[in-house]
Image (cartoon, helix red, strand yellow):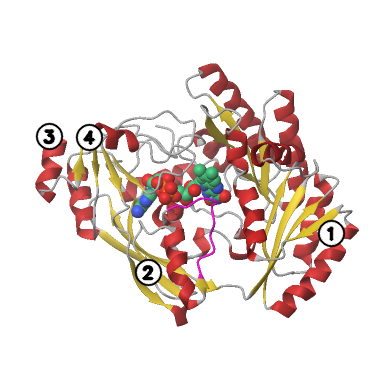
Amino acid sequence: MNLYQDLYQFFKNENHVSQKLNILLDHSKDQSSYHPSHLPEVVVFPENKVDVIKILKYANENKIPVVPFGLGTSVEGQVIPIEGGISMNMTRMNKITELQPDNFLVKVEPGVTRVQLNDSLKEHLLHFPIDPAIDASIGGMVSTNASGTNSVRYGSMKDQVLGMQIILANGEELNVGGQYLKSSSGYNLTNLFVGSEATLGVFTEITLRVYNIPKYKLTALVEFTDLISASNAVVNMKKRDLSIERVELIDERTIEAINRYKSRNFSIAPYLFLELGGNEDIVHHDYELAKEILIEEGCLNIQLATNDLERENLWEIRHEVAFAIKSLNPEKKLMTTDVCVPLTVLPNAIKETRKIMDHSNIECAILGHVGDGNFHAVFSVDPENKSEVGLYKKINEQIVDYALKNGGTCSGEHGIGLGKIEYMYKQHGNSVSYMRQIKSLFDPNNIMNPSKIFKK
Ligand SMILES: Cc1cc2nc3c(=O)[nH]c(=O)nc-3n(C[C@H](O)[C@H](O)[C@H](O)COP(=O)(O)OP(=O)(O)OC[C@H]3O[C@@H](n4cnc5c(N)ncnc54)[C@H](O)[C@@H]3O)c2cc1C
């Protein structure tokens, strides 16, 4: 068997199948994580569902691993083909196939990116709100159940996916969900596939919810004396049911890193990035209430963005936090913890994380999607330095253990991939054996993204 020749026969076109070293290298790693790279044997570029079916049927008959590749921004090694085989680049399947503005839904191929989607929704005054702080493909975002800054208002990808067309490992087409907003009919297979990290099949079309662009937004940077007061303010704003679009927390050391990276001079303190959105009168009303709560909780300063440019500048600061940390050691890669805990546990979880980092003398950014109890510690690691990687994994483990002991999860939005396999077992106990049986049901030859999520 010659993998390249066999796949070439399907397409008779070098544009669809490649073994060029630079292309293999591009598909051997993700964009920024510390996980070691591994070359695929071949990279394929399907352009439609039929291509995907042909490739999967062939791979299944010959028991060849297949790893779909979106934009490679996932951070737990999800796209690394550690068993070789086929990397299936999905970026050419990038059509928005149907938009139903009055039903607030859109159908897209998996290679459509969130920025591309939002650009084309704008003229209908609609938007797709999930924002993982970087551009990413919809297929990849479904696969990791991504979320980000807007999840306090809109939830995560599982709350957006209404239906999907999936090609299973044996080439069979499966259609799950539909175009409806609710259903009590049968098992929820749609949500089973969301977050499956390519271990169950390849998504070829996804039906998503879309929303009105908020008519009015008010964005503020709020300085606090301490993390506990900042977190309490968020809990109290949520209790009052204010129209929060996004609320993000960073700690003192993180703003120090931003000051260095962006040549700014923010006071060294914890900050909330707060955005309210909706009808103008409601937003103003809610802002007055928010201000009362923020002041009651002892905030030191509220800096309002007065126009779109200032708003964008504020969010740019928040989105560049990871790069601020990376800039200290540009040659290194990023390791990112991603735990999610009950809201009231969050302040202590963040404090504990900072203590662990300071104790080990590690420079890191801590940023929280504080409205969800989800936070990250981001630090730079030299992937070639085994003892450094070992030490940092131990630190990661301490943060995850704290979260698990306090009712949390080992991943709020980044997924398991290669980096968090052992925590799956700590978190889910015997549920993992049922998950494995589901995997075997859909992919008995274990060709779909093998060696990810589960122990071998
Ligand atoms: C600086 C930075 C900040 C980030 N911040 C956030 C954040 O705030 N929130 C968040 O949720 N994430 C965040 N991420 C992680 C990342 O953006 C997400 O994991 C994203 O969802 C991955 O999309 P992608 O297109 O890059 O997918 P890839 O990385 O290419 O793939 C991810 C997974 O999807 C699978 N996949 C891709 N296409 C398909 C398909 N068609 N069918 C089945 N499986 C498929 C792949 O095999 C892989 O398992 C961040 C990443 C970076 C680098």
Mark earlier in primary sequence (3, 2): 3
Q: Residue at x 23, y 51 (%)?
A: 170
Question: In the rendering, which numbered label is found on residue 20?
Answer: 4
Mark earlier in primary sequence (4, 2): 4
Q: Is residue 174 visible?
A: yes
The crowd level at tag 4 (other Cα within 10 Å; few <14, some 14-19, many 20+) is few
- Secondary structure, mark 3, is loop
Residue that mark 1 sits on: 294
Circles 4 and 2 in contact, beta carbons < 8 Å = no
User: Position of 114 compared to 344: left or right?
Assistant: left
The crowd level at tag 2 (other Cα within 10 Å; few <14, some 14-19, many 20+) is many
Closer to the eye: label 4 or 3: 4
Tell me: residue 243, above or below residue 340: below
Mark earlier in primary sequence (3, 1): 3
- Secondary structure, mark 4, is loop
Q: CA distance from mark 4 to mark 1?
A: 57 Å
Mark earlier in primary sequence (4, 1): 4
